[in-house]
Amino acid sequence: MEPRLVGPGPYRATRLWNEIIELFRAGMPLRKHRCRFKSYERCFKASEAVDCLHELLGSNQNFGPEVTRDQTVKLLKKFLKNHVIEDIKGRWGREDFEDDGHLYRFPPSSPLKSYPKKPSCEKEVIKFPDWSEPKAGPSQEHIPVKSVSMNSEMWYKRHSIAIGEVPACKLVFRRELTQTNIEEIWKSMTLSRLQKVLGLDSLDEVLDTKLVNSKYIVQNVYNVNKQGIVTLEDKSRPSCSDLKQPTYSGFERDVFKTIVDYFGQMKEPLLTFHFFDIFVSVLGLLQKPSKAVEALQISCLLLPPENRKRLQLLVRMMARISLNQDLPPLSESVRTRTLMVQAFSRCILRSKDEIDLDELLAAKLVSFVMDNYQEILSVPPALKSSIEDHVIHLQRVQIKYSGADSDGTLPPPSFCHQISTGEFEHQRATGSQEPLASLLEEIVMNKEISVKDKKKKLKQFQKSYPEVYRVRFPTPETEAMLFPEKTKQKPPILMWALKKPFQPFHRTRSFRM
């Protein structure tokens, strides 16, 4: 069984758990072992299971080579607790698995987790200000019409007033946008963009949108300092920048331990329990780093401002410590980067229900965020400018004509997303099949161009659109029928003349009597 990439979507953690179980059962070698003068068939040592599962996780693109042996042992403990494996006496249910020589085996069938049924969340429809209520003021009939850029259809409507074909235009004001309206626009467009980046039909199964606070998004975007760190409204906390720092030996380790203890005592991770599924879904995009970065940028905007600020400061510290070659080692046995991931991944991401792959998923996410923290923890500029332009568009005075379904202004902005070369080629080949086929048929049936030019055009078409060309000419025979070869037969007299010299005509005697 080959490992596959589990992409974004609902229940990704459960899908990963089931896949790892199936891969482990298929790849773990089973053989005969002896224990206390007794032989046991089709079993394995604990250390052999650690070797096999560690190699499997390291080569699996859903987890990667950063998975440690210690994390593998912890996962096998959960396997034993959930009866994925059992000891040779059939015991299971406890997490007493160790990396040693004890013997284990698979039960007749390892239980796979079923997908939970979440209550469907009703889609939240945001009501934007409409055209229905004009702003109170002078009579609409006496308001001068300002010049605006119009397309040909709108120009015709305006200038056809003179002949009475359509009624006169008038200025129409939208309701004034309140701060609540603007915050709801930010929420709506932010979630819409996140859904497109993840490639999901709906966010309902990975995120309860009712729990997304629109005020948090706006505050995370605009209330920031020069470094992009969120500034909180409560500034009563004292600053530690002026305090003198001691320089005794081992000071760095003591500070690190204090920070670990501080974040370790939090009851809820920085990415919050509500957003666990959405961040696990983003992990399915790590094979496309640019999309993963954008998805994490948007997802982090949904966090409470205090959580976002702590996350920004913590991840920046982790990245700088990992890259600081002059810093004394914080551990004698573990590399600094690995230590950062192990120490803080649980306080950044974990599930409220303690899903069995929490630690591996959190380590994967934290490693990626550390490598790209400057982009991920900044405000996505394209999203910000697009929403701001849309708000300005909604606040403009509009021109409306009676019976017209649309106004002369631009529609709300929309997003496009980057696709791979393979997807582009597929769309190019299939998205315009019909018009290309018509063009090819037109070249074939055109009798005004010479045979030479027709062959040249067909050759160019075949090179550019081989799939369309193959449909029209599936075999060389069908292509040859378009240009039948004409056989040239020379007159026999010419052949005879080449063989015999010319002889003058001689009158012969008549046979008539």
Image (cartoon, rainbow, N blue to C red):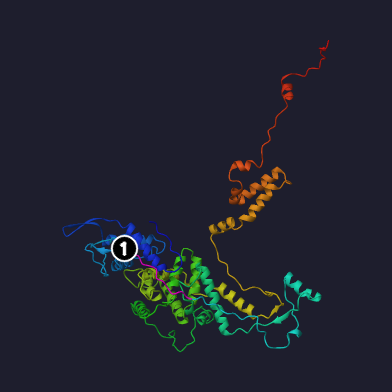
Q: Can the viewer see residue 236?
A: yes
Q: Which residues are magenta?
A: 112-121
Left or right, 373 with respect to 332, comes to right
The front one of 71 and 475 is 475
Q: Quadrant of residue 77?
A: bottom left
Measured from the top left, where is residue 22 in percent x and y? 35, 60
Measured from the top left, where is residue 4 in percent x and y? 42, 60
In the image, residue 114 lies in the stretch drawn in magenta: yes
SS at circle 1: loop
In the image, residue 331 lies in the stretch drawn in magenta: no
Measured from the top left, where is residue 190 in percent x and y? 53, 75
Residue holding disc 1? 110
Q: Can the viewer see residue 55?
A: no
Circle 1 packing at 10 Å, graded few (<14), some (14-19), many (20+), is: some
The front one of 260 and 361 is 361
Q: Residue furthest left?
A: 37
Q: Is residue 406 above or below residue 18?
A: below
